[in-house]
Amino acid sequence: QLRFTVEPGTGVRFGLTAIKNVGEGAIASLIEVRTKHGPVRSIHGLCEDLDLRQVNKRVFESLVKAGAFDSLAQGDPALEGLAPAVLRPRLLAAIDPACEHGARLQRDRDEGQAQLFASPSAGDAHRDSAAGSIPLPDAPEWAESVQLAYEKETLGLYWSGHPVDRYAPELKAFGARSTAECADLQTTRPRADAWGPGGPKPIEPDTAIGGIVSTCRQLKTRKGERMAVFTLEDSQGGVEVIAFPEAYRKAAGLIEPGTLLLVRGKLERDDESVRILASEILPIERILERLAHEVAIRVRMPADRTVFEALGEIFARHRGDRRVSIEIELPSDARRLRVRADLSAAFRVQPSSSLVAEVEQVVGQGAVTLR
């Protein structure tokens, strides 16, 4: 419907006019078609009766990105069961041909080329059958991050998940807090000695949190040094992060809306809010490097001596304290054999994205695993 509506026994349905770039005139036209012809079964069939002056390509794109057309997969054997990341790009690719199909059919009707002697119900049945037989174009599947970004763009919130969710196990293993856990600390009054002349003191001297930057303000100190205040969000809420000049200088390029970050710092509170005074700001992918105990490399034979010499040179440039192992895949007539060699006695490395990139240039994409 136009507005948010209560569905007894189900919950609240999202009002369609709350979707970005979708006006009341467009939704009124959609609802009119649904009221007159029944449930919408295909995007091509819908376009045959819509006022395409009200519902243009931009409206369709927003509705698809928001997930409003996901229901078109129900009852269609070719589409039912498809994940939104597979269905929505195909619906998006169908917008232009569907609008052209609808405009052509409406023009034919206006010019009197429709089946003049068919009953209205027969015409409706013919239309549904013909439109329903038009397949959706093929289109590349969206990455999860793309699907979520489109939901945020059109709905103002992440609907089917949150970008940080895929790092939840690693964040938990790392000991990172959620924004809700940080907020819960507000319910406990600080000790009398937690306050001093300079205001509140840190609740915890070292806290880690992972999230996505939602808003950011670039500021300057009285000395003219650059710093930033930004909001870091996860699926449970948001927390303010203050990056003073030293932390900001090291991570200025990362503090942008839409960036996934891992922040370490002091958790501080006053009477109204909780904030983190950042001491370290990293891309959230770096959490895998922090947790890794071993760098495992898969090498498929045949591989000559130069491959292993190149790997040795890379290890020497990335010395650290983590183990290195190589799994060599040996082709066999019966089955593929793997031989695992532990190189920890000779090499130990520091896991990083540059190490992974350099190794994969030698042995192939996807050959490195951080364990």
Image (spheres, rainbow, N blue to C red):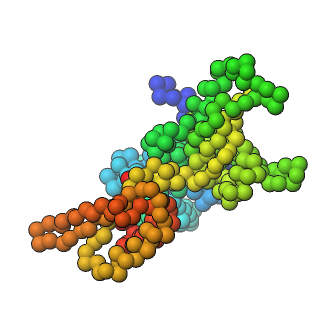
Closest to the observer, 221 or 336: 221
Residue at 60%, 35% in the rendered image: 179
Report x, y in % for residue 301.
25, 75
Image-quadrant location for residue 266 = top right
Report x, y in % for residue 212.
60, 47
Report x, y in % for residue 32.
57, 44
The vertical placement of 118 against 3, above or below, is below
Left or right: where does residue 138 sit relative to residue 61?
left
Image-quadrant location for residue 336 = bottom left
* Residue 301 visible somewhere in the drawing: yes
Q: Which residue ends up furthest to the front in the rendered image?
A: 345
Q: Which residue ends up furthest to the right in the rendered image?
A: 222
The vertical placement of 173 against 271, above or below, is below
* Residue 50 visible somewhere in the drawing: no
Q: Quadrant of the N terminus?
A: top right
Report x, y in % for residue 80.
35, 49
Q: Which residue ends up furthest to the left in the rendered image?
A: 334
Residue at 46%, 45% in the rendered image: 170
Residue at 65%, 20% in the rendered image: 188
Closest to the observer, 334 or 51: 334
Closest to the observer, 215 or 314: 314
Closest to the observer, 25 or 4: 4
Residue at 72%, 43% in the rendered image: 242
Label tally: 0
The vertical placement of 200 against 176, above or below, is above
Left or right: where does residue 148 sit relative to residue 20?
left
